[in-house]
Image (tube, grey):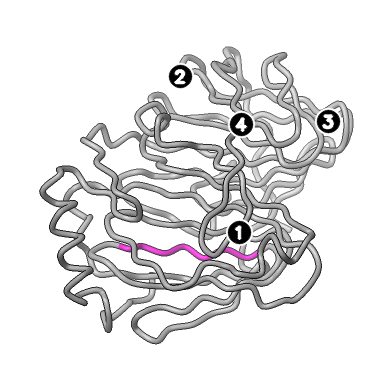
Amino acid sequence: MNRPAAMPTITQARQVERLVRGIATSDGAGVKLTRVLTQDLQRRLDPFLMLDAFRNENPEDYIGGFPDHPHRGFETVTYMIAGRMRHHDSAGNHGLLGPGGVQWMTAGSGLIHSELPEQQEGLMEGFQLWLNLKSGRKMTAPSYRDIPAACIPECEVEDGVRVRVIAGEFRDVPGAVQRPDTEPLYLDVHMPAGSRFQQALAPGYNAFAYTYRGSIAIAGTAVPDRHMAILGNAGEGVAIEAAQDSRFLLIAGLPLAEPIVQHGPFVMNTPEQIQQAVRDYQAGKFSGVTVQSL
C-alpha cells in the first residue's frame, strides 16, 4: 500500500454542472452496456470520447463479447471490476484481462482486435474509456499494455478511503500509466460510509465522476449509483462525501481543442481522414500490423 501526501486543502470546490444517466444499448455481439459518455458530450469532455459501463450477471448479456473490429486515431482503456476478457489483435498478440486489471491500447494508425469473455457464467463488470489522440499522434504505430491488478498503485488515505491510481498522479503517487498531450488522471476511489475525499484538479482540465456503487455527494450534489457527474471547470479540485459505502471513477484530462470527426471505430480530425481510414481498412492495411508495447 502506497503512502501518499496529506489531503489537499480545497478552498473552492468544483460544482456538478450536470448529471448524466447514460443510454442503455448493446455493442459487439450483443453485449448489453450503458453508454455514459455519448458523442454529443465529446466537445464538453475533450479529450474523452466515450465511456461504456457494463455490469451483467446473465451470461446471455455478455457471452458474445466483441469479435474482431478495427480502431484508428485514439486510445482505449479497458478496466475490469469483475470477470475475465481475452484480447487478440491483428499482430497475433493476446492477453487475459482479469478483475482489477487494465488494458491501455493505442490504436494509432490502425489495428484489428477482439475482446471475448473467458468465462461461461458469473458477473462481468467493467468500463471502456476512449481517449483522443493529438492530431500529430493519430497515425503513430499501434501499442498496448496489459496491467495486472497488482501493478496498479493503491493508496489508503483519511477515513479509510482507498484509491487505485490507474493514470496520472494522486498526491505524489504516480499511476500505472502516464500519457503525453492529454495528461489523463484516472482514479478508482472506494469510500466507506461517512468518509470524505478531496482531489486537486489542474486548471483547464475537463473532469467527470462516475458512481458505480452506492451514492456520493460532490459539493453537496447527490450522484447516485450508475450516474456520471460532469464537473464545472471553476475551482481548485473536487470535494466528495459518502453517506454509504460507495465506489466511483474520477477522470480528468487536458483538452486537445482540435476538430473531432468520428465514424464508428475511427476518430480523426477531418472527413477526408475518415474516408482514408475506411479505404485502408477495406484494403486490409490494418491486418498484420506490428503492435508495440506501450
Give the foreground label among 2 and 3: 2
In the rendered image of this protein, does residue 59 appear above or below residue 53? Answer: below
The residue labelled by disc 2 is: 233
The residue labelled by disc 1 is: 31
For the point 36% across and 39% down, the residue is 47
Could you tell me how far apart the alpha carbons at marks 3 and 4 are, in whole angstroms?
Answer: 20 Å
Could you tell me how far apart the alpha carbons at marks 3 and 1 are, in whole angstroms?
Answer: 35 Å
For the point 29% across and 45% down, the residue is 262
Extent of the magenta region: 101-107
Q: Is residue 39 left or right of residue 283?
A: right
Give the foreground label among 4 and 2: 4
Q: Nearer the viewer, residue 179 or 291?
A: 291
Among numbered discs 1 and 2, the one appearing first in the sequence = 1
Could you tell me how far apart the alpha carbons at marks 2 and 3 are, in whole angstroms?
Answer: 24 Å
Could you tell me the amino acid type at mark 2?
Answer: Asn
For the point 21% across and 35% down, the residue is 259
Among numbered discs 4 and 2, the one appearing first in the sequence = 4
Could you tell me the amino acid type at mark 4?
Answer: Met
Could you tell me how far apart the alpha carbons at marks 4 and 1 are, in whole angstroms?
Answer: 21 Å
Local secondary structure at mark 3: loop
In the rendered image of this protein, does residue 288 appear above or below residue 148? Answer: below
Could you tell me how far apart the alpha carbons at marks 1 and 2 are, in whole angstroms?
Answer: 34 Å
Among numbered discs 4 and 1, the one appearing first in the sequence = 1
